[in-house]
Image (cartoon, coloured by chain):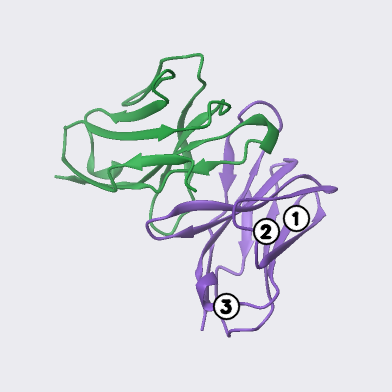
Amino acid sequence: QQQVKQSPQSLIVQKGGISIINCAYENTAFDYFPWYQQFPGKGPALLIAIRPDVSEKKEGRFTISFNKSAKQFSLHIMDSQPGDSATYFCAASLSNSGYALNFGKGTSLLVTP
Amino acid sequence: DADVTQTPRNRITKTGKRIMLECSQTKGHDRMYWYRQDPGLGLRLIYYSFDVKDINKGEISDGYSVSRQAQAKFSLSLESAIPNQTALYFCATSGTGRGTEAFFGQGTRLTVV
């Protein structure tokens, strides 16, 4: 069963807008929550990550918000650009599985000019 | 040269054939992983390895086997390929430590006819 649930499946945002992707998890043992970005024909690449002892992490235009009590985390892309058009995956992992990633199903983001 | 190299990049094979997908890395990482990506399903873990002597099954290991020939090499085999193993396969590596970044190869697109 999918251990990490991701929504929406697809998202269209105008240039300059805010893109928001949400994820939820069940296993409270997860202790590392990364977001990966994937362009067509390429492998996923780490975008930003957070640990559960922090409620928010920001890197440039990308912010992760983390709500431990609700077991939810989200990615916010501020001032979205056409170059941000890609598929985004949230993931969760834990130490006793070597931090193997449990991925959400992905969100296809299209930023229109 | 890529840090994580997968060969072949594309492969078409017939049902019942044995096929091996290869992965090599120059990151010097101990941990290696094989994932499978299907449209709308995200990436799912097939096998992972902490080192040459430590190999573990992931979420969807049935029908697959792996071999860790060296720290830098991790191969995935389909002993008797079937059409529902048609997918995009990714190899990844990560360092030791708590929740470190995973680096992905460019993927192998496998079609079983």
In the rendered view, does B58 fall on the left or right side of A64?
A: right
Marks 2 and 1, the one that precedes in the sequence: 2
Residue A45 screen position, x and y as percent = 48, 43
Q: Are marks 2 and 1 in contact (CB under 8 Å)?
A: yes
Dot 3 amino acid type: Ile
Which numbered disc covers residue B23?
2
Gap in angstroms between the C-alphas marked 2 and 3: 21 Å
**Which quarter of the rendering shows the C terminus of chain A?**
top left
In the rendered view, does A109 fall on the left or right side of A88?
A: left
SS for dot 2: strand
Most foreground residue, A52 or A63? A52
The residue that label 3 is drawn on is B82
The residue that label 1 is drawn on is B73
The residue shown at (70%, 74%) is B79
Q: Chain of mark 3?
A: B
Dot 2 amino acid type: Cys
In this view, the mark in front (3 or 1): 3
Q: Quadrant of residue B67?
A: bottom right
Residue A64 screen position, x and y as percent = 38, 24
Dot 2 crowding, Cα within 10 Å, few <14, some 14–19, many 20+: many
Q: Chain of mark 1?
A: B
Q: Are marks 3 and 1 in contact (CB under 8 Å)?
A: no
The residue shown at (65%, 63%) is B62
Most foreground residue, A4 or B47? A4
Gap in angstroms between the C-alphas marked 3 and 1: 25 Å
Q: Is residue A30 above or below residue B60?
A: above
Residue A38 screen position, x and y as percent = 41, 48
Regarding residue A77, the answer to whether it shows in the image is yes
Most foreground residue, A26 or A90? A26
Give the colour of chain B: purple
Looking at the picture, do discs 2 and 1 lie on one chain? yes
Give the colour of chain A: green
